[in-house]
Amino acid sequence: MNAGANGPAGDLAARQAALVAALVDGAPDPPGFAADRLAATREALLRKRSGQAATAWPLLAAGLGPDWARFACSVLAGRPVAGALRDGWDVALAARAAGRLTEGARRELADRERVLRYDGVRPPHRRPIARLRGLLRR
Amino acid sequence: MAAGADRPRLVAARTVGASPVAGLGVGWRPEIAGVVAGVTGLGFCEVIAESLDLRHPGRPPAGPSRGVTDLRERGIPVIPHGVRLGLGDAGGVDPGRVAHLAACARALDAPLVSEHVAFVQAGGREAGHLLPVPRTREALDVLVSGVRRTQAELEVPLALEPIAALFDWPEDEYAEGDFLTELLDRTGALLLLDVANVYANARNRGQDPSAVLDRMPLDRVAYVHVAGGAVHPDDPLGLYHDTHLDPVPPAVLALLEEVRERGAAPAVMLERDGRHPPAAELHGELTAIAAAAWLEPVR
């Protein structure tokens, strides 16, 4: 198809990629879309991700209480979609840095860190010792 | 384009009764497993395909799959509902995800499976959400090929669900109903009509939902979704969000009645994905849906 100078026709793959990058990766909006509607979609996506992260990190979410959605959305904005475990982990690290971890949230994070290693770059993965314990328990 | 020029089947009798499911249903989720276990008279359930773990077919399943097995043991038909296939992904559907959906259908002895008219990843990134495809000839070709690729691995019918979206593509060439009709005509797929999505899109586009229904291929409805939503307090545009976290608004139930009046609600189910209400409230929503759709209520 011809993506020429006449506008956005053709090359669906590139158009979809530009849209996803704009919605979840902080890239600029692709031309032709209503900016306010993309902004609303971005917000809805963040709320959905923060809700899923709250399910995976109940004590962390409870600790932040009514401020959870605002705090979690601000942490997740512009970060690629990575699943509830990692999303919540990023929120937990931000909350720790801001001195906002409650006792329950601190325990939740410590429990996760005992089993999983997460460096903020690669997805969380099981620590060798935890993997060994899991094998022995089988 | 010459919409509807080659659609002789529209003059044929409504195909209600030909649907592979009937009655009142509910989207099974682990959080409401206890409630669903106590409900009698369910015609069917739907389960998120991606939540099913089929890695050890010989062993009794752990986690969510255990509750789903219980449904089958009660004789309740279960429909695997995919949310990550990406039938509209320009890069093509992921073969592993197609295989998983087909395996779910076999494992559950499902009467049909369903997926969305949407794309979910592009450029190597997951959207984490169902995103609308542009309603263009090019996107239609992508969808047709994704649907056919999926149907080739399925032994049961595939129903397609049009999604709720907060934006449209600037290059849209078709109205939603016409786009959908052509997609179903070219693939033979059935329609999973989500009345909450129809309501949300019509309201957010400033359209009349009844007029939108008029152009939908209602003679192809396999079953109907009903879900709650709300206007989010922080949304400056005042858009209606199809959240699946809020009660079903009266306007959505009214639209369900319209669908039933048109003979297109053979099987209807409630979708609730979070902030689960107490059992009595969930029962109340099922009762209201049964009343609107003229279905036998559950107990």
Image (cartoon, grey):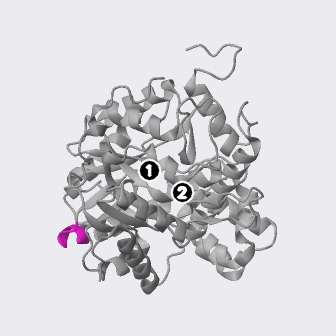
Residue at image point 66% right, 50% down: A41
Task: Identify the residue at horizontal 78%, vertical 74% (top origin).
Answer: A100
Q: Is residue A39 left or right of residue B86?
A: right
Q: Residue at x 69, y 82 (%)?
A: A103
Q: Who's the residue at 29% across and 53% down the image? A: B55
Relative to A69, say whether A107 is above or below: below
Q: Nearer the viewer, residue A47 or B243?
A: B243
Which quadrant: the C terminus of chain A? Answer: bottom left
Number of marks in picture: 2
Residue range corresponding to the magenta coloring: B70-76
Is B92 drawn above or below residue B264 in the view shown?
Answer: above
Query: Residue B68 lies in what quarter of the image?
Result: bottom left
Q: Is residue B40 left or right of residue B85?
A: left
**Residue at image mark 1:** B83
Which amino acid is tagged 1? Val
Image quadrant occupied by the N terminus of chain A: top right
Residue underneath mark 2: B199
The amino acid marked with disc number 2 is Tyr
Task: Indicate the secondary structure of the residue bearing disc 2.
Answer: helix
Task: Identify the image quadrant of residue A54.
Answer: bottom right
Question: Are there few (<14), some (14-19), or many (20+) residues within 10 Å of tag 1?
Answer: many
B149 falls in the magenta region: no
Tag 1, which secondary structure? loop
Is disc 2 on the same chain as disc 1? yes
The answer to whether B90 appears left or right of B266 in the picture is right
Q: Position of residue B275 (x, y in %)?
A: 54, 74
Could you tell me which chain the residue with mark 1 belongs to? Answer: B
Furthest residue toward right: A98
